[in-house]
Amino acid sequence: MNKDQVKGRMETAKGDIKEAAGKMVGNDRLKTEGQAEQAAGKVQSKVGDVKNDVGNAIKNAIDR
């Protein structure tokens, strides 16, 4: 795992918690913030996945 994958997954988890808290207390702003953080975390995590895949492809090409 690279740092983008870790940070993205942490941001997604933080967003999940904020959204749940917003729903629980009836705070639409907190709920929306949580949803936005989840989306941002998923994007960052996906960037990390792509970086990892590219790195692995390069490594495999060099090893051949």
Image: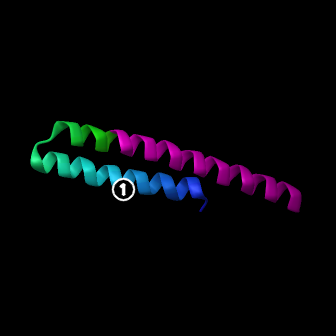
Residue at the image position 66 percent from the left and 49 percent from the top: 51
Q: How far from the left and from the top, in percent, is residue 21? A: 19, 52
How many neighbours does mark 1 have within 10 angstroms: few (below 14), some (14-19), or many (20 or more)?
Answer: some
Instruction: Place residue 5 in its image quadrant.
Output: bottom right
Q: Quadrant of the C terminus?
A: bottom right
> Where is mark 1, residue-wise?
13
Query: Which stretch did the figure color magenta?
Result: 36-64
Q: Nearer the viewer, residue 25 or 49?
A: 25
Residue at the image position 23 percent from the left and 42 percent from the top: 30
Left or right of 62 on screen, residue 8 = left
Q: How far from the left and from the top, in percent, is residue 63? A: 87, 62
* Residue 64 seen in the figure: no
Instruction: Place residue 28 in its image quadrant.
Output: top left
Residue 3 in the image: above or below residue 25: below
Q: How far from the left and from the top, in percent, is residue 9? A: 45, 55
Residue at the image position 12 percent from the left and 50 percent from the top: 24
* Residue 41 seen in the figure: yes
Left or right of 20 on screen, residue 8 = right
Is label 1 in a helix, a strand or a loop?
helix
Colour pattern: rainbow
Q: Quadrant of the N terminus?
A: bottom right
Q: Nearer the viewer, residue 46 or 61?
A: 46
Which three-letter amino acid code belongs to the residue tagged 1? Ala
Magenta region, main secondary structure: helix
